Amino acid sequence: MTQTAISTKPKEEVLILQPTRGWGSLNLSELWVFRELIYFLTWRDLKVRYKQTVLGAAWAILQPFLSMVVFSVFFGGLLRVSSDNVPYPIFSYTGLLPWGVFSKALTDTGRSLVTNRTMITKIYFPRLVIPLSSVLAGVVDFLLAFVVLLGMMWYFHIRLTSNAWSLPLFLLLALVTALGVGLWLSAMNVLYRDIGYIIPFLTQLWFYVTPIVYPSSKIPEKWRLLYALNPLVGVVEGFRWALLDTETAPGLMVTISAAIALVILISGLFYFRRMERTFADMV
Amino acid sequence: MNALAIRVENLGKKYRIGLSPERYRTLRDSLVQAVNAPRQLFRSAEKRENSTIWALREISFEIQKGQVLGVIGRNGAGKSTLLKILSRVTEPSEGYAEIHGRVGSLLEVGTGFHPELTGRENISLNGAILGMKRAEIEAKFDEMVAFAEVEKFIDTPVKRYSSGMYLRLAFAVAAHLEPDILVVDEVLAVGDAEFQRKCLGKMSDVAQEGRTVLFVSHNMSAISRMTEETIVLDKGRLLMRAPTQEAVDYYMASGFSQTGQRTWEAGEIPSEAAPFQPIALRFCDTKGRVVDTIRSTEPVSIAVEYALNAPITGLRVGIYLVTMRGEYVFTSFDTDNPEMFEQFGVRPAGHYVSSCTIPGNILNEGRYVLGLNASSFRVKRYFQEEHALTFTVDGTGAPGMQWPEARLGPVRPLLEWQIEAR
C-alpha cells in the first residue's frame, strides 16, 4: 500500500503516499512492528467471547468433546468404522482437535474484516493483523481441548509416543492452512458478502473430505496422494501419528499437504495485499 | 532540521458510485439496450465514466512543522477524504503526499472500543489500535483515567458507562497519543459543552508543544481559536488557503451560498423522505421578497413549501435556527400550538406552505443557519436538513447600537426597562 523510506536525516521517517498498482510486495516486516496490536486483538477476541457466554471457556472443551461422543456412538459403535486399532473416542478426538482450530478460524477470519469495519475505516494498521489475530485466538481453544485429550489418553491407558515432539509442527500446519484459506475468504467477503453464506457450507463439505470420523487408510492406495491435496489430511494424519503412532505413516501425504498449505497461504497473502487498498472504501 | 511536515501534491481520490438501486437498474437497462442496438453500447460506457466521482482532486499544499492548519468546507467537500488519505486509511487515486514523522489520527474517538470490556481493558486495546506501545500506555494510564474522570468505574464494562463517560474515556486515550503530526476530524461535534471545552484545551496543549496539527471542524469558533491558517475545500477542490480569519469570512460568505431560498430537486431528496417531498424553503422580508439579509429590527417570514404524496398522521414541519458557531437558538414546528395540532391531526395528501414570522428585535446581528425538519413524533423523521439556508442579520438600529461593541448571545431583544429612583 505504501512505501516507507528513510531520508538522509537520521531518525526521521518519511512516508510517501501514492497510488499503487499491481501486486506489490508483501511487506511482512510491518507485522512485526504491529505485534502488540496482534496480541491485543487476539486477547480481545478471547476475552469478549468468554465474557459473553454463560459457559465461557468450557465451550472450547464441550464442542469437540460432545462431537466425539456422538461420533463414537454412531460411527464407532453402530457403523463400526475402523479406527486404526485405536479406541474410537481417542481416534475421532485427535481428528477433531486440529479440525476445531481450522473450522473456527475459517468462520472467524471470513467475517473478521467486516466485523472490524469501524477500525478499518478509521485507522491505519496492516490489515493482515485482523485475520491473523482471529486465527491465533483459536490456539487457546485448542490448548484447552488438548488438556482433555491428555485426560482421555490417561483413561484409555495410552502413552504419549516418542513422535509427540512433532505435534507443534502439525499444529503450525493447521494454522497455516487456516490462515491461508481465511485470507482468501476474508478479502473476498469484503467485495462479495455471499462469502458469508458460503463459509458454513464449505466447512461442512471440508469436514467430510478430512479423515476425522474415518481413517485415511480407508482411501484406496492410488487415490491417497490426490486425497492429500486437502491440507487437513496431512494435519489430521500427522496428529494421529504424533500422538498415537498409527500405522499410516504420514510421510508423503504430509509433504503434499504442507506444500498445498503453503501455496494457499502465499497466494492468500498476495491476494489479501492486493485487495487491502480497497478495504477502507469497500467494507 | 527539515521544517516540512506534510507536502501534498496534486492529490486526488476517485470513488465509484455503484450498487445504489438506481445504478443497478441503469446497469440492467443498459444491458438490455446494448442487446437491442449496438449504438447504445457507447452511451452506456459514457454513463459508466459518469458513475465515478472525484471526492478530492488536484489538492496541493504544504504544512511546516509545528503549524496548526484548519480545514473547512461543507459536507462532502472532501475534508474527511483528505484526512483519511493522510492518515493512510485509504490510498489516493492520483498524486502524491509526503509525510515527515509519525501520524496520529483522531478520526473518531473510541474506535475499537468494545462494550463488554472494562474501562481498563479498553484503554489498553484502544491505545494499541492507535499505535501506542504497551509501555507507553502503562506510563500514561493514570493520567488518562484522571482526564476522563472515570476512576471509580475503571473496572466496569464500558457498556454500563453513560455516554459522557464513554466519550471522555475514548478521548482521553486518543488525546494522550504523542505523534509528530496529529490529524483531527470533528471530535468536537460530540459531547456536552464542558467536554468540548476540555477537548479544545487538550488540543491547544498539543499545538503548543510544537506538534503539527491538521484540524477539521464545522465549528468556526474552534477553528478560529485553534489555528492560524486554514484551507477551504469545496467539491473536492482546494479553494483557498489564507490566515484563518480571512478563510472563515470567505467561507461564511460563500460557503452555504444560497440566497434566501433553498429549493430541492427530485434527485436530492432521499427515498426515505417519502411521502414527504420538500419543494422550497424561503426567507422573506415584510414585503414578501426573498432576501438573504434582514435587519435585526424587522420581522421576517419563513416559508416551507412541500408536497405530501400520501396523508401523514401527526406530521410536524419545522425549523431549527442555529448560529454559525453551531449553537441552537430555537426549534419551532407548525403544529406546536395544540389547536393547530388538533386541526392537522392527519394531513391529507396535497401541496402545502407552512409559514411563520420571527418578530423584529429578536435576533442579534450575525449570520445564522436555518435547518428544516419534517417528522411525526416518535414515529418517523421524514426529512431533515440542518444546513438548508443561511442568512445575515444586520444590526443597524438594533437595541444598544449606540455602543459600537459586539453583543454576546444570539438574541438581542428590546426589553421594556424601567428605571425608578428610590
Image: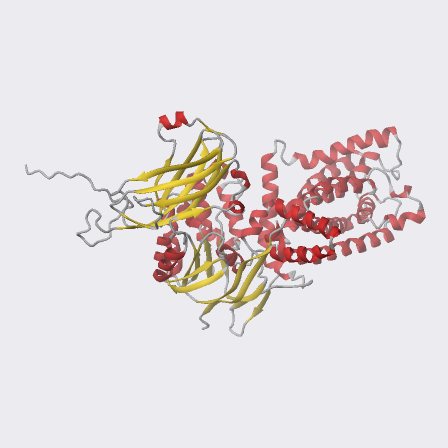
Image quadrant holding the N terminus of chain B, namely bottom left
Q: How is the image coloured?
A: secondary structure
**Rendering coords of residue B7 (x, y %):** 49, 68
Q: Which residue: 53% across, 62% down?
A: B57
Q: How many numbered markers are drawn? A: 0
**Rendering coords of residue B13 (x, y %):** 56, 60
**Rendering coords of residue A227 (x, y %):** 87, 47
Residue that sits furthest to the bottom in the current view: A8
Residue A105 occupies quadrant: top right
Q: Which residue: 46% across, 50% down?
A: B173
**Rendering coords of residue A223 (x, y %):** 91, 48
Between residues B366 and A49, which one lies in front from this camera angle?
B366
Residue that sits furthest to the left in the current view: B422
Instruction: Please indicate whether residue A78 sits to the left or right of residue A4 in the image.
Output: right
Q: Which residue: 60% across, 50% down?
A: A39
Instruction: Please indicate whether residue B98 sits to the left or right of residue B224 in the image.
Output: right
Residue A22 occupies quadrant: bottom right
Instruction: Please indicate whether residue B241 sits to the left or right of residue A88 in the image.
Output: left
Whether residue B142 is visible to the viewer of this picture, yes or no, is no
Between residues A137 and B349, which one lies in front from this camera angle?
B349
Whether residue B147 is visible to the viewer of this picture, yes or no, is yes
Image quadrant holding the C terminus of chain B, namely top left
